[in-house]
């Protein structure tokens, strides 16, 4: 009987993942038009946001915001439509130590998993208190992320928001394979990466069965992040932009 229950649990998880993937694909194939904003995420899905806070994220984009500020605003925008009962958490990389220190263990879980209804405020407060200043120990952050998910969590998804690749010499593709073996999918949101960073972010997504979401300009960041998280609708329409940059 225990074996049958285990098989049913696995099958249910696979069905949820396939349903979510189909809805996301449908949303991405549709033109951006007006319409109600719906969520593909169910209450059993856990999403870990990993935000790059390395010095390269301080490069200016459109609208006078740097990449880090644009990413903060995009997260604030999309949290407004994230299902209140769904679980979400925030991990940072490159936020604790100045780049000159070369800290290859600079990654921290700043907001552990909890329902979005309560974690929205905590995540926004953390984003306002944190700045970009470090390097990019991406492989280390991915390995640490495996322990962030609650025991027994379902449909574990990492959404990695970055503008580049590993700066500590580690193999991010190998790290991604480890996450895949642990049943964790990684969607990568790539903010104007260079060629090497693009290849790494694509490899991470591919190795885990996730998707790569390019962001050629910061004006589409909130839209691509929403798709990476799993927020979508047949008639896709992003919510009004929120700005928390500068406090």
Image (cartoon, rainbow, N blue to C red):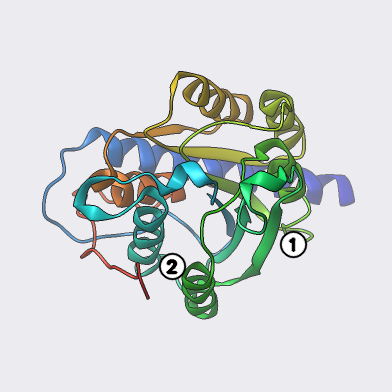
> Element under label 2?
loop
Q: Residue 132: horizontal and vertical position, in percent? A: 52, 55
Is residue 19 at all visible to an observer of this figure?
Answer: no
Quick one: label 1, few (<14), some, or many (20+) residues within 10 Å? some
**What residue is shown with label 2?**
83
Which quarter of the rendered picture does the C terminus lie within? bottom left
Residue occupying the point 23% across, 56% down: 238
Give the quarter of the image for residue 218.
top left
Residue 78 shown left or right of residue 63 in the figure: right
Query: Neighbour class for label 2 at 10 Å: few (<14), some, many (≥20)?
Result: some
Quarter of the rendering containing residue 209? top right
In the image, what residue occupies the spot 40% across and 38% down?
A: 22
> Which disc is residue 44 wearing?
none
**In this rendering, would 80 be left or right of 198?**
left
Q: Are marks 2 and 1 in contact (CB under 8 Å)?
A: no
Residue of label 1: 150
Vertically, is 238 above or below 203? below
What residue appears at the point 34 percent right and 54 percent down from the top-left corner?
A: 70
CA gap, disc 2 to disc 1? 18 Å
Residue 60 percent across, percent down from the top left: 31, 46
């Amino acid at each position: 009987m225990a074996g049958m229950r285990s098989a049913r649990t696995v099958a249910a998880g696979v069905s949820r993942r396939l349903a979510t993937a189909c809805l996301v694909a449908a949303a991405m194939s549709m033109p951006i038009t007006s319409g109600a904003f719906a969520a593909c995420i169910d209450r059993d899905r856990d999403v870990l946001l990993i935000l790059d806070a390395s010095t390269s994220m301080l490069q200016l984009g459109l609208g006078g915001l740097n990449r880090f500020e644009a990413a903060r605003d995009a997260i604030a925008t999309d949290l407004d439509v994230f299902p209140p009962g769904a679980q979400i958490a925030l991990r940072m990389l490159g936020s604790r130590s100045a780049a000159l220190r070369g800290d290859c263990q600079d990654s921290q879980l700043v907001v552990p998993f909890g329902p979005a209804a309560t974690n929205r405020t905590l995540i926004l407060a953390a984003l306002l208190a944190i700045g970009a200043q470090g390097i990019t120990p991406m492989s280390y952050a991915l390995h640490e992320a495996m322990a962030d998910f609650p025991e027994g969590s379902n449909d574990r998804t990492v959404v990695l928001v970055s503008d580049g690749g590993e700066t500590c010499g580690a193999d991010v593709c190998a790290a991604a394979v480890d996450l895949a073996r642990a049943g964790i999918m990684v969607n990568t949101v790539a903010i104007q990466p260079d060629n090497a960073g693009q290849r790494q972010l694509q490899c991470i997504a591919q190795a885990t069965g996730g998707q790569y979401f390019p962001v050629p300009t910061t004006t589409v960041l909130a839209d691509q992040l929403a798709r990476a998280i799993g927020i979508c609708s047949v008639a896709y329409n992003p919510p009004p932009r929120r700005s928390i940059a500068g406090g």
